[in-house]
Amino acid sequence: MRNDYRSGRTLIRTALWLSCLSVLTVMLSGCVALYVDNGVPDTPATDFHRPQTPQPVQLLFSFQTKGVANPRATDLLKDQVKETVTNSGLFSAVSADPAAGGAILSVTIDNEPITSQQDAMAKGFGTGLTFGLVGSQVTDGYICTVDYVGAPGSAKIEKVVHHAIHATVGAHAAPANSTKAPDAKTAAKTVARQAVGAALKQLGDDPAFGH
Amino acid sequence: MFRLLAVAALSTVLCGCVTVKVGDHQPSLDTVSGLRDSGITPLNVEDFKLAPGAKPETDKGVSARGTPVNPPQGQTFSAYLRNSMITDLKSAGKYDAQSPLSVQAELTANELHAAGISRASAVLAARFRVMRGDQAVYDKVLKQEQSWESSFMGAVAIPDAINHYSEQYSALLAQLYADNDFRQACTPPAH
């Protein structure tokens, strides 16, 4: 009888723990939604102003977090960036090695939080305390800088594009003028493709760029 | 968004005691164009190792609030520094495995202090030698130190510390490339 009582209590405790664990899992995995800002759309291939004789280029890419190089995020996005540069048609070949003629294209994407760290934490705690009933939204900015040097000693051409990802937590409406991303990797690759594409469009339109 | 990824990554780290490896070194435009236009002769990069008398752990790993941070692919940190230099030189067209000039280095300091709730810091130092045959034409210890604002939240502080720590390798090499004595030592002799 006493053993039955003990095992019953253990069973209830286990059930409570499992309930808490499943609620926590749902909260951690299911309630964050990511939206890519629509302010920087994809650049159609036909929109690039290509030079008559495209030249090969050496591509350097770095992803930064608040101005500090983030090699792990760079690894995640470098193929996407190379693909975008190649597909633009502005260059005859794209490689990490020095190019014949000495042209260098440097692409930097810097993740600068638009919502401050303190504000993001306060919002997150508020959402957590209400079990997600009061939702919150934070925004991360991405500053894409494209620097092009046509030959050793020649002047640098610089183009800058600003992009953003919005994240909502808990019960919060989708941000206006944005597109929901299925996951974080897709959101990051979309931002890289759109921001680099837009900066390359500006580069191709610049009269100083090999026309 | 990358803050959310960092939190998710940290959750994995905390649950599974995962070791974080430093990512591959990426050459910057300043480094590549600076080396390319410097007029130095292409260099070979020889042995990079731990300095005599230094603790062996110095070359194997550092820690960010209990999260082990290791060099990539089972390397040592001195090998990571060597590979970073080769990447820079190759990107600038200044690497030549047959060059009569070669660079050697000994890692003398490698520290990451990320336990503080408001500040964190890192120190990296190495003795660099440029050899022409058996003769050292450059021999100098260079030290790179940096401190930055940290956070009480480990989910923010740990990835931030790893990024800042990784950047010390680029900064130490940038010091070397900018050193006039180094450039002079690597300039082809006038005939």
Image (cartoon, rainbow, N blue to C red):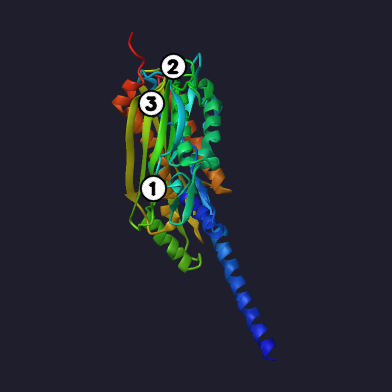
Relative height, residue A117 to residue B58 (above, below) = below
A47 and B30: which is toward the camera: B30
Q: Is residue B138 visible?
A: yes
Q: Which mark is residue A210?
A: 2
In front of the other: B40 or A99? B40
Please state which of the two labelled residues, at mark 1 or mark 2, is closer to the viewer. 1
Where on the picture, by quarter, is residue B94? top left
Q: Position of residue A13 (x, y in %)?
A: 61, 78
Instruction: Look at discs 1 and 3 and give the one toward the viewer.
Output: 3
SS state under label 1:
strand
Dot 1 corresponds to which residue? B111
Tell me the kind of residue under disc 1.
Glu
Q: Is residue A173 above or below residue A88?
A: below
Residue displayed at 46% across by 64% down: A127
- Residue placed under numbered mark 3 in the picture: B130
- Using the numbered discs, state the Cα–Cα distance from disc 1 to disc 3 in whole angstroms: 25 Å
Q: Is residue A143 left or right of residue A36?
A: left
The reply to whether label 1 and label 3 mark residues of one chain is yes
Badge 1 density bin: few <14, some 14–19, many ≥20, Cα 10 Å: some
- Image quadrant where one finds the N terminus of chain A: bottom right
Closest to the observer: B77 or A129? B77
The amino acid type of the residue labelled 2 equals Gly
- Vertically, is A64 above or below B135? below
Q: From mark 1 to mark 2, how far is it between C-alphas?
A: 47 Å
Query: In this view of the protein, which residue sits in the foreground, A178 or A132?
Result: A132
Q: Hey, which quadrant is residue A25 in on the image?
A: bottom right
**Mark 3 falls within which chain?**
B
Tag 1 near tag 2, CB within 8 Å: no
Q: What is the CA distance from the residue labelled 2 to the residue labelled 3?
A: 40 Å
